[in-house]
Amino acid sequence: MAIMNGAELLVRSLMASDIEVCFGNPGTSEMHFLAALDQIDGLRSVLCLFEGVATGAADGYARMMGKPAATLTHLGPGLANGLANLHNARRARSPVVNIVGDHATYHRQYDSPLTSDVEAVASTFSDWVRSTSSPSSLASDTADVVLAARTPPGRVASLILPADIAWTASPDAVDIRPNWPAPANVPDERIAEAATVLKGPAKSLLYMTDKALSDRGLNAASRIAQATGADLMTPISNARIERGAGRVAIGRLPYPVEQARAALEPYHHIILVGAAEPVAFFAYPDQPSRLATEGTTCLELASADEDLPEALERLAERVGSDQVLPKHEALERPAAPTGSLASDKIAIAVAHHLPENAIVVDESISTGRHFFPFTKASAPHTWLQIIGGAIGTGLPLAVGAGVACPDRKILSLQADGSAMYTVQALWTQAREGLDVTTVILSNRAYAILQGEMAKVGVADPGPTGRRMMSLDDPPLDWVALAKGMGIGAIATDDAAAFCRALGEGLATPGPFLIEAQL
């Protein structure tokens, strides 16, 4: 039997479990892993200059590929830098495999400066955590971490590798799991109960997310809606939606509590398809946390770990929609906008230019809340959103989507404040030559917080409050920031100029950035 070190066995085991990409920011404890990448072909390594970029990129990759990438981070502090986007990945139900280097087992007792409880750090935002205890268990531990990540509906799994196990000789004994678990089928009684509600006289809503927003799920939901008079809606944030011409359009629940309650008021029954009961994002004085009208029943058709499209297809058959075709959008390309630049004109320009099969990554926050209606009949595309609420995910998601789908154009719609959390992702886009056009929505403020302050009862913030929500002293220069990381960029406050720049960016391969000055 051949002998290799633990790091080489780890790389071979990851590849045997169909891990093809590693987004990493390594340190001293991970040097043998890097050496193994040089010795073994087949695992693409992507350097990220901040761990939050690595974890966010793994999320974007998983959303597009339906399988995990690996991340590589350095000890507890390095992993901690990536936790916010692991929170988003968990909320997106993205499978992610974290490989976390740790001090050598015999070195921990000396409490050197970077010593921490890595398992505790990992467990905060992981569904599964293990620390490899010996070279003999490394192969099975690696197979287990991938299996955990691929367990429906998709989980964040973390494997901690002490440095001495990485450099210790290990037997060449890759462990391979025979197959990945499939989502469970929904019991017949839940299908029957939902069908009874839908065929009754009261108004019903199919409240859908996750895999229900695939083409297959949306087609079945559209047939149900037409056969029963039910409506379709998604939460405000979703991991992935297939949208555009030739597909079923679906609206989102509004973010503001008053608007959300008004949108849900007509319904006596809310049928949950992979979604939880709709609740407010935050608590506000004198506002309810639950958004459905009192007396409305919430009925779970299928949970996130079950086969959502299959459940919808069975439900469609049960309500008698055999002869009903899904209602698809016809292609619409609005005329190019003119005049001063504003959020609606950005949306019109996107609808005007969006190429077929593009991937839109949306972390537009407050500016982009109205982008959805303008683009529902654009060329067919995939839409990824911030989900989980931890800002700083958009630019990394675009990295992951670009690595996963090099044949598809990525359009990143990015709020300026949250972009600064993970601005290093632009460097990775340039280094990897990713086909990403980034639009920075530059209102030079944490605009969402200005609205939130009023909602929590602070009607008129003072100078300190206003300063803490302002990004204009000094103003961020996105053209300079992009060019400093190797990306061409322009800035404009004119709608026609923005529309031309967007068209050029989308038509030209490689990364490009537009600062849309609002």
Image (spheres, rainbow, N blue to C red):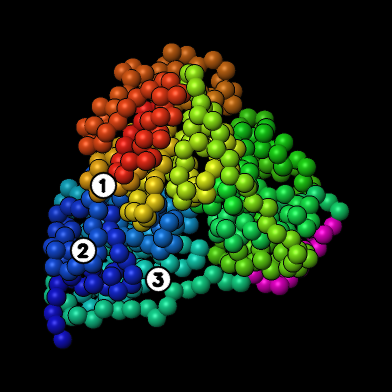
Q: Could you tell me which quadrant the N terminus lies in?
A: bottom left
In the rendering, at what x and y percent does residue 307 appear?
Answer: 58, 67
Q: Is residue 410 visible?
A: yes
Q: Amino acid at mark 3?
A: Leu
Of the two numbered discs 3 and 2 on the same chain, state the one appearing first in sequence.
Answer: 3
Asked if residue 197 is among those painted magenta in the image, a careful observer would answer yes
In this rendering, position of residue 189 left or right of residue 82: right
Magenta span? 186-200
Measuring 26% from the left and 78% from the top, which residue is drawn there? 174
Asked if residue 163 is among those painted magenta in the image, a careful observer would answer no
Q: Nearer the viewer, mark 3 or mark 2?
A: 3
In this rendering, position of residue 446 left or right of residue 256: left
In this rendering, position of residue 59 left or right of residue 311: left
Q: CA distance from mark 3 to mark 1?
A: 31 Å
User: Which residue lies under the disc numbered 2?
Assistant: 162
In the rendering, at what x and y percent does residue 75 appear?
Answer: 24, 54
Tag of residue 147: 3
* Local secondary structure at mark 1: loop
Q: Nearer the viewer, residue 336 or 518?
A: 336
In the rendering, at what x and y percent does residue 203 appear?
Answer: 80, 49
User: Which residue lies under the disc numbered 1?
Assistant: 433
Find the residue positioned furthest to the top: 463
Determine which quarter of the picture holds residue 283.
top right
